[in-house]
Amino acid sequence: MVAYSVSTPTTLGVGVSLNLLKGGESHMEYTLSMTFLTALGIKSTLSISGVKASITEDEANALMDLIIAKNIFITTTGALAKKESSQLTEKKVTKYSVA
């Protein structure tokens, strides 16, 4: 465990030491964000959370191609027409017990 010390002044001017211990259950969460251009050329981003960590660039491209081909998402600026970019975001989540 790693201890952090935070010193906070009180109304009496006396510092109070607070130890914050690093701990808890941690896991990684992954989100695939896909940015498309609509029929009017405006960027539109679709994000899917809970994707597998091992998703490849080819799989992301294939998914984007399928989304465009099936034309299932319509925005206020038209259908998704062209791929702009994609990225996989990794986020570490640590849950603490607050009983």
Image (tube, rainbow, N blue to C red):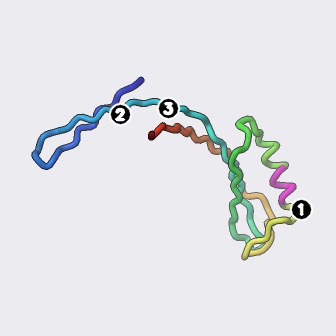
Q: Which residue is mark 2?
A: 20
Mark 1 burial class by Cα count in 10 Å: few <14, some 14-19, many 20+: few
- Expressed as whole percent of the image width and height from the top left, the position of residue 9 reads 18, 44
- Cα–Cα gap, marks 2 and 3: 12 Å
**What's the residue at 12%, 40% (across, down)?**
14
For the record, the magenta segment spans 63-67
Q: Secondary structure at mark 3?
A: loop
Residue sticking out furthest to the right:
70
- Cα–Cα gap, marks 1 and 2: 51 Å
21 in the magenta segment? no
Q: Which mark is residue 17?
A: none
Mark 2 burial class by Cα count in 10 Å: few <14, some 14-19, many 20+: few
Badge 1 amino acid: Lys
Q: Secondary structure at mark 2?
A: strand
Q: Are marks 1 and 3 in contact (CB under 8 Å)?
A: no
Look at discs 1 and 2 and give the one toward the viewer.
2
